Amino acid sequence: MNARQANPWAALSALCLGFFMILLDTTIVSTAIPAMLRELGAGLNAIVWVISVYLLTYAVPMLFASRLGDRFGPKRVYLAGLVVFTLASLWCGLSGSVEMLIAARAVQGLGAALMTPQTLAFISHLFPPSKRGPAMGLWSGVAGIAAIVGPLLGGVLVDHLGWEWIFFVNLPVGVVALALALLKVPDWQPKHSHSFDVPGILLSGAGLFFIVYGVQNGQHYDWGRVFGPITVFEIIGFGVALLVAFVVWQRFNRKEPLLPLSVFGNRNFSAGTLTSVTVGFAMTGMFLPLVIYIQAVLGETPTMSGLLFAPMSLLAGMIGPFVGRASDKVNGKILLIIGLAALASGMALVALIARADANAWALTPALLVAGVGIGFIFAPMGNLAMSSVEPRFIGTASGIFNTARQVGGVLGSAAVGVLLQARISASIADEAATAANALPEQYRAPFAEGIAKAAESTGEFGSSGPAAMPGLPSGVAEQAQRLALEAVHNGLTDAARVTLLLPAAVLLLGVLAALTMRRPVPRAHHSPAPEPVPSAA
């Protein structure tokens, strides 16, 4: 099947099913975090790695994967990635330890990296600029729904089948997506012979890994030595140095650099890429503190915590296609800024409303505001960033744009994870010290020290609170248990509130970037040509 014979909407729908599956896995794990902490006997830092390693191996190879699509055909690379992703999902579900699960998630991320660049490249190939708005609307609707429906589906599966099924569910979806892609997606062959920038791949991958490793493990090592004389900050600095070396190498690589810097001469694309980073950061980072708060403090089940996100999911999915159409008719910059501001406001409102004794459904208005924001973001962001890119840079630009969002997700997962761990330890210790004043004097110090020490694990607390202190008189023991539960719940609530402000603040950087964007001038579309315009990716 070639581009002339293919139904572009049928092809896009088939691709979106696989796209939905891989984006679902960026959020579905969040709802299962308390269950995995218990059943795998792991700490919060290790479980955050289950999220981060997927995002890391998803983001790093994506530019390389876009070039594979140019050389071997986007359909073939997409199908290969889909097979890898589906089989890795089976491995994830069968993992019996957190270390095995992290390894399987890394392979799963590689499969996702092969798939994602091909979807946006196909939109640019199958649809003329005048019709890309609705196509981007469908794409954005899928992205928005997948990012939010993950917690709902994950909650149902965890409650009724176990955390393993958040991965097993990918098996039937993967088989259906594979069949539809084989039947509906054209075998487009750009046939561009590219060289592969191996030094660029190694420098960018290693640099991002060391930064994420340092940031995410900083609290674990108390921001001091990791091994021998090497400190956390030296690891982060080494990662930054590698990324600087990567940029310098891209500047002087005269063949085919992994990241051609010339594409950033387009203001809209540069601003759109930065905005995409902030969106990835916020949408990945927002779920971890929310799930910990809803399940550990408010005592809701994984299913109920997922249901709390359902209205936001539905609203985002309903708004996305309409915003996509509107982005062809009005200045998409305005729509994008509205979306970014609404998402940031929704997170800030959740932080304002959250209390240890709150009703979970009291969060709904704030989450609906966030849902409006998500619905307004994806279509105009993609349209503004890609529509003004020169045709010869489409392949490169699509890879960079998708990579940017995933890099944002990696940084968001790491930064939010370490901030949450730090705030849990500090806030619970503070609350325990305050609560201890209600006990007889001889029990105050052991109580406060015991709760503070337990808080350092950041993974032991459910709605029942920490274990009771041994050797206390019955009357004091009951009071101490009640005070301990209050200290833990108040501390977790404070930690979640403070942590939610971080992704909200990062979105304001996205607003500043969006303000610099211009309304794109439509380009002529010669459709369909025997071969697409050569891309630089």
Image (tube, rainbow, N blue to C red):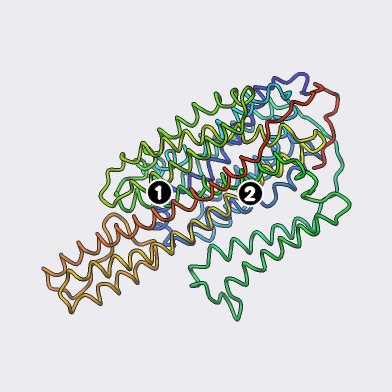
Q: At 65% from the left edge and 22% from the top edge, which residue is drawn?
A: 9
Q: Looking at the rendered structure, which numbered label has been put on residue 290?
A: 1
Say whether residue 521 is visible. Answer: yes
Quarter of the image for residue 243 reads bottom right
Dot 1: within a 10 Å radius of its alpha carbon, few (fewer than 14), some, or many (20 or more) residues? many
Counting from the top left corner in percent of width and height, residue 499 is at 44, 55
Q: Is residue 496 above or below residue 517?
A: below
Mark 1 to mark 2: distance in Å? Answer: 24 Å
Counting from the top left corner in percent of width and height, residue 163 is at 43, 48
* Closer-to-camera residue (479/473): 479
Quarter of the image for residue 321 reads top right
Mark 1 vs mark 2: give the one in front.
Answer: 1
Disc 2, SS: helix
Disc 1, SS: helix
Q: At 59% from the left edge and 60% from the top edge, which residue is drawn?
A: 212
Counting from the top left corner in percent of width and height, residue 141 is at 55, 30
